[in-house]
Image (spheres, helix red, strand yellow):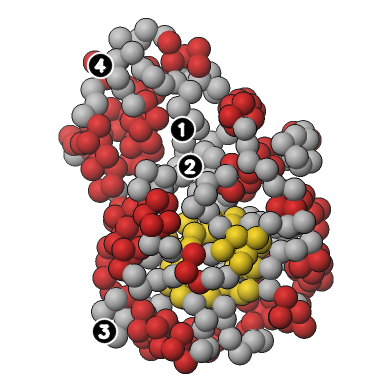
Amino acid sequence: MMEYRRLGKTELEVSIVSFGTISFDPGPEKRLSDETVAACLNRALDLGCNFMDTARAYGECEAMIGRTIMDRRDEFYLSTKSTAMTYDEAMKDLETSLEALQTDYLDLWLAHSVSSGERWQRIMEPDGEYKALAEAKAQGVVKHIGASMHRDVHVMKELISSGAFEAILVAYNVVDGELLEPEVLPLAAEHDVGVFCMKPLAGGGLVMPEEKRKPGFGGPDAVVAGSLRYVLGNPAVACAIPGMIAVEQVEANLGIGNNWVPLRDEELKELRSVIGSLGLKFQYGETCLHCGSCLPCPQGIDIPMVLRAAEMKRGYPDNVKYLADDLWEWLQFSSEMCDECGECLDRCPRGADIPAALREAEATFAVEGAS
């Protein structure tokens, strides 16, 4: 049986594995057919999935949903998003979304990617996007409102604490938690703001070619199954919304929701070892799994955080690189602190040259300072 969890103060009971639809339309050349979309969505509904997430910015995705499963509208909750800055723009987006989706209401409407202080401040101005969200909810066209967010934990905390939003969509997975765990997720739980998670498979980075897949952790692909179980193991998370483009993926992923049990400590260690052995690089070019296996460092160095700061500096958009600078300043790290004792080397599941990586991290910030 599928497990369902309460999405914070929305009171929606959502399937722990739900459906993210961005992969339906990565571009005209790779866009899925309506037949494939219908097969995937209908199979998901048959297996107990009751929550679909899309966005106005996802190409034809809204229209695909509208054309394929609206005869089953009473079986699922529907969420979409708007990137609008202003009230007028947002209301136009809402009208367009409803038409494309072939529905007269949304269960959840999100301000899309509130991921910088500038966007956060603008949407909350008197004529900003938030006015449209609140008005649409008051009119009953939208049942609940929220925001999707990336990277900027300061904005996340402000938005959660504002009391204006009922749910947030954040990126969270076993190799990159976007620094959500220390404060953001506990704060959301404290304010009863529902949390659902995009990129539970690192934007497809944890989906292996078929020839590399091995069963494990309760699924036909050990890395996928273990990664979903990891995300769902956080008590602040209501559901994960992996992208799925084939019925086989739907059946495998929904199978985790229908038979979910949390990862045991030894399973998590094994999962990280398996991922480490694959030699992958992720969204910001990082190779560190941020697993903490290298700790404790005899010299007191927070190795994962030092490497994380450097990844942020290299990969984050310019308007949020200040987060990397803030973290680096807080760490007060110098490569001279590392005496290359080698203890971390034996524990890293990737077999990384950690002392060299620490020096590279310091060089990343030294180059910026010199410029």
- Marks 1 and 2 close (CB-CB < 8 Å): yes
Question: Disc 4 residue type?
Answer: Met
Q: Disc 1 marks which residue? A: 290
Which circle's residue, 1 or 4, is located before the other in the chain?
1
Dot 2: element: loop
Is 41 left, or right, of 94 in this rendering? Answer: right
Q: Position of residue 225 (x, y in %)?
A: 69, 42
State whether residue 311 is above or below residue 43: above
Real-space Cα separation, disc 1 to disc 2, in angstroms: 7 Å
Location of the N terminus by quadrant is bottom right
Q: Disc 3 marks which residue? A: 126
Viewer-nearest residue: 21 or 141: 141
- Specify few, some or many for label 3: CA neighbours under 10 Å numbering under 14, 14-19, or 20 or more: few
Real-space Cα separation, disc 1 to disc 3, in angstroms: 41 Å
Residue 337: which numbered mark, if any? Answer: 4
Q: Quadrant of residue 23?
A: bottom right
Q: Position of residue 72 (x, y in %)?
A: 76, 79
Question: Disc 1 residue type?
Answer: His
Location of the C terminus by quadrant is top left
Which circle's residue, 4 or 2, is located before the other in the chain?
2
